[in-house]
Amino acid sequence: MKYLSNIGLAIFLIGLAVFISIPFLGQNRLTEDAISKSISKPYHLAAVTKAAKDSGILNERFTSTFEFIQKLTGVLETAKANQETAAKIENWQATAIPEGVSEWDFRIGDTKSLTFSLTNASLKGFAAENTFLAFLLSFGLAILGGLLFMIPKFFTLPGIKHNGIYHNSATRGLKVGWRSFFLVATIIGVFMAGYFQSGLLAVYSLLVGAGILGYTWWEGKTKNKEDFGANAPRSASPSVSGWIGIMTGTLLIGFYVLLYWFPEYIVGWVALVNPFSLKLSGNPASQWFLYGFLYTIVMLVMGIRMAAKYRHNKYQLVRTGSVVFFQTAFAFLIPEILVRLNKPGVDLKNMWPLDYDFFFSYNLDNLIDSGGLGIFMLGWGIALFLIGVPVFVYFFGKRWYCSWVCGCGGLAETLGDPYRQLSDKSLNAWRVERWLIHAVLAFSIVMTGMVLYTYFTGSYQVLGFDSYQVSKWYGFLIGSAFAGVVGTGFYPLMGNRTWCRFGCPLAAYLGLVQKWKSKFRITTNGGQCISCGNCSTYCEMGIDVRAYAQRGQDIVRSSCVGCGVCAAVCPRGVLRLENSSIDIDTRASELRTLHISEKDGVKLVG
């Protein structure tokens, strides 16, 4: 079986290497046909075509996509400047702007989307001309290798044991100082991306990644590994993460940076999934279809790993199947099919405030203009967070969404499961968590209020702030940087629920209801606790479960997502996930313990 795992690992790495190399194998040739496929407005089409001819890149073959993008960027900036000049001349020459076209529509705005569409339409080379073969050599080999690697896990003894997770170079974690360095470096890079929107970020990211990798390798060679196991003190942490964990984190962060801000550099990856997009929605693939496809495939494959690891626990098997189903059906397939039917491609399980652009004008107009189905989707979305959240959380806690339905939680539970032990259990982390996640919730409420004010009044100025700029920065900082770059990219560095724990506004909303009015709690039997620490080690939300268990105190923390892994890894059955209306009005007391006496029996004391 070990040989089978090694073979699977080798095949996976080959597939991953092919996937990473594909953007470097692309060629580009900008033709008039490619321009016409990418630009629908005739006045923009004419401006870009003229600028391309004048620059000499029209019909020229580029062997490097990166070189092509640099030339294309200059062409689009020239076309944009020409349109700006023509719009200004319009005041004296009425023929400059076509009749019936507004000045702002005549101008070429943000050129980022044009850069992507033109680069995609002009792509030649291996991925574009041998799509099926390229898909098999990348996605196919990676999936096959991953499955072969996991098969032996089904033949081991069921149950959870500490098998070197704090010594493994992929799952050791990162000490606090280096976590801070990674966070600061990422935040600086993200702000650079938002402010400059240039290739400078790519260079910066490479330098930071290379520096951290170099230091990691040096320290791993020169220092002895420290011993950190289940019974290590809570303040303890590895000296530095192993090189595999650092490399994985760097790749994930780099992927999200390219996906959100430089999608033109990954058109080779988009080409791999283009046939699937054409079959499902009838439209060419975008970077977002690539993301949804990759997201779903990863959850399916890693869901099998979850089934192998937690096959002794029925709750985990059903829960994993649930999140994989909702991601595959509701988040990926159904929206694509709806688009093919000329209906709004809505993820019916997603809701505000996690779906922060639900109340944006373009989304509201799209739903309203789509007739009865669109109106239903609008009403469904509003009812889900106004009525669905309080009702379902009352009966089942926030686990009904965070651990059974949510795509973010689903990825954290599958792809992120190897890193759940890295969640910081310190009191300081809890303090930061409470302030930060509720600050994001407040930010989302204020932003949404401003957006709705603009929608109904037409005024962008709200109390001296531009609602468009506020919503734009929310999408950039929270929707992209926090939820994507940090939320997923930091799995191997800070644990798998960084976004859910510190940033998700919906998790904050669900948590508030769970803390103050929910029947859900994790009950403990302190008399049987042997202080092994498994529960705290595997808690992805940073809860020191062992401390509660030792006191016989029920766990009613607002951050608990009810994943049930603490109960699954407990060797004595100390922990149970239960629903009860007892003490529902006093459950948020600071200290709650069980007192046992001959006179009063068992009594819950606050």
Image (tube, rainbow, N blue to C red):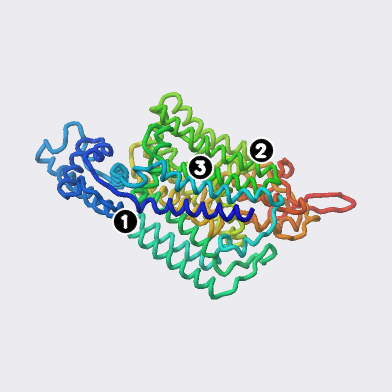
Q: Nearer the viewer, residue 227 or 579?
A: 227
* Residue linked to disc 2: 395
For disc 3, the neighbor class at 10 Å (few under 14, some 14 to 19, many from 20) is: many
Q: Secondary structure at mark 3?
A: helix
Relative side of 1 to 117, left or right:
right
Residue type, mark 2 in image: Phe
Q: Secondary structure at mark 2?
A: helix
Relative side of 225 to 343, left or right:
right
* Residue linked to disc 3: 296
Residue furthest bottom as drawn:
222
C-alpha separation, residue under disc 3 versus residue under disc 1: 30 Å
Question: For the image shown, how many numbered marks are present on the structure?
Answer: 3
* Residue linked to disc 1: 198
Q: Nearer the viewer, mark 2 or mark 1?
A: 1
Residue type, mark 1 in image: Ser
C-alpha separation, residue under disc 2 versus residue under disc 1: 49 Å
C-alpha separation, residue under disc 2 versus residue under disc 3: 29 Å
Position above or below: 417 against 215: above
Residue furthest right as drawn:
598
Q: Is residue 367 visible?
A: no
Dot placed on the residue nearer the N-terminal end, 2 or 1: 1
Dot placed on the residue nearer the N-terminal end, 2 or 3: 3
Position above or below: 429 against 328: below
Residue 339 figure quarter: top left
Dot placed on the residue nearer the N-terminal end, 3 or 1: 1
For disc 1, the neighbor class at 10 Å (few under 14, some 14 to 19, many from 20) is: few
Whether pointer 2 and pointer 1 mark residues with C-beta atoms closer than 8 Å, the reply is: no
Residue 367 figure quarter: top left
**Where's residue 440, x and y in %?**
49, 50
Q: Nearer the viewer, mark 3 or mark 1?
A: 3
